[in-house]
Image (tube, rainbow, N blue to C red):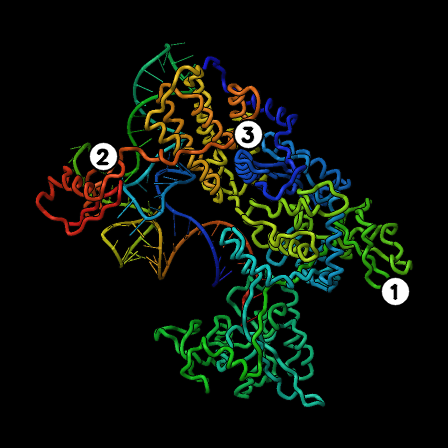
Amino acid sequence: MAKKQVYDHKKIEKKWQKKWETSKIYKTDDKTLKAGQKKFYVLDMFPYPSGEGLHVGHPKGYIATDVVSRMKRMNGFKVLHPMGWDAFGLPAEQFAIKNKTNPMIGVKKTVARFKKQISIIGLDYDWGREINTTDPKYYKWTQWTFLKMFDAGLAYESWEPINWCPSCKTGLANEDLEDGKCERCGSVVEKKPLRQWVLKITKYADRMLNDLETLEWPEPIKDAQRNWIGRSEGSMISFDIEGTSDASGSEKKITVFTTRPDTLYGVTYVVIAPEHKLVLELKDKIKNWKEVEKYIVETKNKTEIDRTAEGKEKTGVKLEGISAIHPITKEKVSVFIADYALAGYGTGCVMAVGAHDTRDFDFAKKYDLEIREVITPADADAQLPYLGDGVMINSPKFNGKKNTEIFEEITKLAGGKREVVYKLKDWVFSRQRYWGEPIPVIHCEKCGVVPVPYKDLPVVLPKVKSYEPTGTGESPLANIASWVNVKCPKCKGPGKRETNTMPQWAGSSWYYLRYMDPKNDKALVDPKKEAFWSPVDFYVGGAEHAARHLIYARFWHKFLQDIGVVKYGEPFKKLQNVGLIMGEDGRKMSKRYGNVVNPDSIVETYGADSLRLYEMFMGPFDQEISWKTDNIIGVRRFLEKVWRLQEKVVTDKKKKVDLDDTTEIIFNQTIKKVTDDINELGFNTAVSQMMIFVNHLEKVENISQAVYLTLIKLLAPFAPHMTEEIWAMYNPKGSVHVSSWPEYDSTKLVLSTVTVVVQVNGKVRDQFSAKNGISKAEMEKMALASKYIQENFAGKTPARIIVVPNKIVNLVY
RNA sequence: GCCAGAGUGAUGAAAUGGUAAACAUACUCGACUCAAAAUCGAGCGCCGCAAGGUUUGUGGGUUCAAGUCCCACCUCUGGCACCA
């Protein structure tokens, strides 16, 4: 190659980013969608555009999806790789409060900044599909889906307690609390019940659980979802409360849910959650009511964090004067309230078996209650509480049986029934804040809750003077009389708009569908486009969304399936988590620690291609790794080596360049490894394989154009700018990014000569080279003839010989 | 407390049960240079002058062979809703 140019990343990257923009090579073509076409929808969890801008950790996932999408495009797939903004939520609102400007303005600025930072990295997004959850044209459909849920009876109003800071006069999320105190002002946080909109996500618990099996997700994430949904099979069993029979003779009951009905004979007391309504109903019979009431108040003022932070120490109060009747033995058992029972799970009541449950054991020990063993452990040394399986004792009719085999029978005997219970709670879907989608309903004195007619959507967020919380717990929207007061769509009488807004999760629960058809004003998504692109083939984002975002989106999707908007039952077929990039000091990148590195400066100094390559090379993709600017020089050197290889490329077509054996093998191995590794997200090893190949090519005198351009193709997804520049030198028209992905010759992956290791008792002692495919017998012979064996074991016959073809002969003496 | 993940050179790391440390950074020495940078070459787990020995958090086990599988433990990271 005659031309000797320096690798000038600034010039090259600017030039191609511009060219790609004008040539639109990354535009997703959906004019002609046919069923048989290969499609690949690859998606990043879209960012919240904060004022701080991007640090080098953010683009790691974007670069990975970019590498994958570029390879898929070269493989002949129709690729959908979009980007957008999840821009509702607190930070923009707080910015607005501070600057007294509409959050829309702040969002515009931060989006522009983010987009610029993302753009200089050279990602192949189709920006024609950019979406923003705060755009009324977008949230029209968020509101539309809410109305559909309302129509389906899945949205209801309920009084739910929130964490309330009496000094800031706002509601707080659990994460805004520190030891039960407001993170910002330190006041003790109270529980305050507010009227909320709630979505019946629990209706989908079973489906969400079962369909997990169909997903190619990391097992830990599936586990997190299973735990979040928390299905348990158990028994509902009732204990009569002594002396509470009414006129008809039936008594008040304490109904417990238990996963261990087999331990029923071991019940020595019963626990009711302090906030359970049954406690109030029993008020007149409780002799120590004052004490009980005090405990209830204490519990109420504890936040959930507080309640859980207490760790092992169990507290509770005995309800004096109250006894429950054991449903089988008819024995009297005492009744406690204790905050380790939660009203929100199961029935809110627990049957306590000190001998076979850790919490019950701790509690029984503390209050000196009887502990009655009903299962003999398989292991005689086992200590109480014994949680495992065994043989029943102290349980008439069941003694001698295995505990695992009596669940049904004992439940029946106790007059109970088997039931399935979920941990999953319905989704509290309203926020008393300004910066969110207005919930599209109207409250009418006569007609009650009336949905806004579909034709009136979107209900646009009005401009207000103050974005501050009102102090009453209501959204700032409540202060805008002109917006709040409307006619009831039904009776035309006076009505008031709902002033609660939706949580940030709403917009992100379905955005992947909007990318398929971003400009559609008639429907959430065109059914043909949905049918073609669904599901998302590959979804990448942080593991912190394992439970919340991914549960909400799956719920939302399944609802849309039920009303016929989507056909496929799951939104995200394959999921991969990005490992965080930490600061050089090993801590999270944050302004607070002063360890933030911006991509802009790295791109300036080393180039976007080096940044991309480094983030892919630095380690396993899903692992958390510390950033190290010093190490970028390694991938930069690699790119320069690739660039310099041009000097060895033979362009004269008459001159034939033969591949020597070794080069040919490494060449084919490299194609295979890079292809396989990208598919399996082993980006770091894909890069190192290319390094090995390039290091080898440096030792070779001449390189054929075909081999060089194949290398360029393999490298193109990682370093799109430099490879495009090199490609253009040999192919003035076209782009490497729409060229075809290389294939390897599977007959040329192994050298004709292999090194065989001679081991004695598993330790390496000698080695010899042999022809690839050498027979086992031949290997054995050569091993016995090796120098080490001759010198140390001559004449001795090994007790055993293990031969691993082409690799190892292990002699056992 | 529960759930999940991770412990390998100075550092980031690699390794279908089959030669541990590929690739890269840092470092040392050398070549080129008046010099420096860049580049190239050599070395680089630990002990040892060497021969050799030894090494994947700790302790056991399975196996001809263990970083990899099993059991127990320790440490770190992330998540959590004491879930009956």
Q: Nearer the viewer, mark 2 or mark 1?
A: 2
A104 over A315 or under it: above or below: above
Q: Chain of mark 1?
A: A
- Mark nearer the N terminus (2 vs 1): 1
What secondary structure is found at the residue carrying circle 3? helix
What secondary structure is found at the residue carrying circle 1? loop
Q: Which residue is mark 1?
A: A446
- Mark nearer the N terminus (2 vs 3): 3
Q: Which mark is residue A769?
A: 2
| Residue at figure coordinates x 70%, y 88% from the top left | A246
What secondary structure is found at the residue carrying circle 2? strand
Residue in front for this viewpoint, A202 or A384: A202
Q: Amino acid at mark 2?
A: Ser
B72 over A243 or under it: above or below: above
Q: Are marks 2 and 1 on the same chain?
A: yes
Measured Cα–Cα span from mark 3 to mark 1: 63 Å
Question: Quick one: label 2, few (<14), some, or many (20+) residues within 10 Å?
Answer: some
Quadrant of the rendered structure where residue A270 is? bottom right
Q: Are marks 3 and 1 on the same chain?
A: yes
Q: Which residue is mark 3?
A: A737
Residue in front for this viewpoint, A8 or A626: A8
Q: Amino acid at mark 1?
A: Lys
A633 over A275 or under it: above or below: above
User: In the rendering, at what x and y percent does residue A793 appear?
Assistant: 11, 44
A383 over B58 or under it: above or below: below
Q: Which mark is residue A283?
A: none
Question: Quick one: label 3, few (<14), some, or many (20+) residues within 10 Å?
Answer: many
Measured Cα–Cα span from mark 2 to mark 1: 93 Å
Q: Nearer the viewer, mark 3 or mark 1?
A: 3
